[in-house]
Image (cartoon, grey):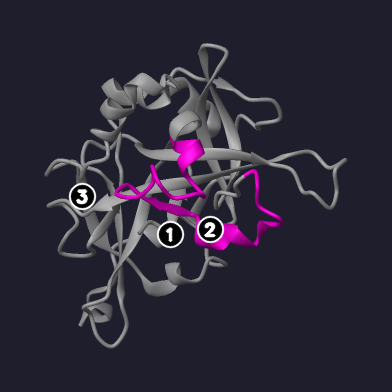
Amino acid sequence: MCGRIALFSPPRAMASLFDAALGDGVDPEGRPSWNIGPTRRLDGIRHLEGSRVLERYRWGLIPSWAKDMSIATKTFNARAETVAEKPSFRSAYKHRRLLVPIDGFYEWDRSVAPKPQPHYFSRADGTPLVLAGLYETWSDPTTPDAPPLSSATILTTSAGDDMDEIHHRMPVVLEQETFDLWLSDDETELDAVASLLQPAPQGTLVHHAVDRAVGNVRNDGPELLDLAPRETLL
């Protein structure tokens, strides 16, 4: 799974790096965070009228048919193996795919006793990660005059060599040459899209143990990325 991320690069930098315009209302400087959990905000890049645009999304996908927002606590990840069939995701998978740029993510090594040990994962080349995502737009049926809410999920797959010693799942990492395919809404390309849902090749990611303070989303700051003191690893 992927349930905690770091996103401290400003939206203007992410938009420039990935050839996207900033969406309406997106602060170019943003609000950096080193500890984002589900139901909080994500940046996402989608195709809009032939161009890429970076917008804000609530993390935890809310299907258009949902009666309320409670489903979002269960839909912050979508499994690559079943995303095309699951009612919550199948429409978005066909028509509303998203690039999710982040600086890194956390995963917990649950083989460590007595408490799981968090690790921070980032790209080995130092550039931001781009994860495969989906988005939906939802309108609250109880408040029809309220603006629609945009929400998103992150796809996961089986862990690759860079991650399987820590966890059996990992987010789907996309490379630059696959971005246009992932964002395409051409249903004839779905077989090619499905081929992207693979573990990242060995050498894509690096990781290190970090302090367990990251387990509480109220803790935030760049110190969360520091290497965990040796005594906490014993």
| Residue depicted at x 34% and y 50% | 82
Image quadrant of residue 224? Answer: bottom left
Q: Secondary structure at mark 2?
A: loop
Image quadrant of residue 233? Answer: bottom left
Query: In x, y percent, where is residue 102?
Result: 42, 41
Q: Does the magenta-highlighted stretch encompass residue 27?
A: no
Which residue is under mark 3? Answer: 206
Which badge, 2 or 3, is on the more N-terminal residue? 2
Query: In x, y percent, where is residue 91?
Result: 50, 37
Query: In x, y percent, where is residue 159?
Result: 21, 54
Q: Quadrant of the N terminus?
A: bottom left
Q: Is residue 170 above or below residue 213?
A: above
**Which amino acid does the dot numbered 2 rest on?**
Pro
Query: In x, y percent, where is residue 120?
Result: 31, 57
Q: Which mark is residue 3?
A: 1
Disc 2 to disc 3, how far (Cα)?
23 Å
**Which amino acid does the dot numbered 3 rest on?**
Val
For disc 1, the neighbor class at 10 Å (few under 14, some 14 to 19, many from 20) is: some
**Residues in magenta?**
64-93
CB-based contact (under 8 Å), mark 2 and mark 1: yes
| Residue depicted at x 47% and y 20% | 16
Disc 1 to disc 3, how far (Cα)?
18 Å
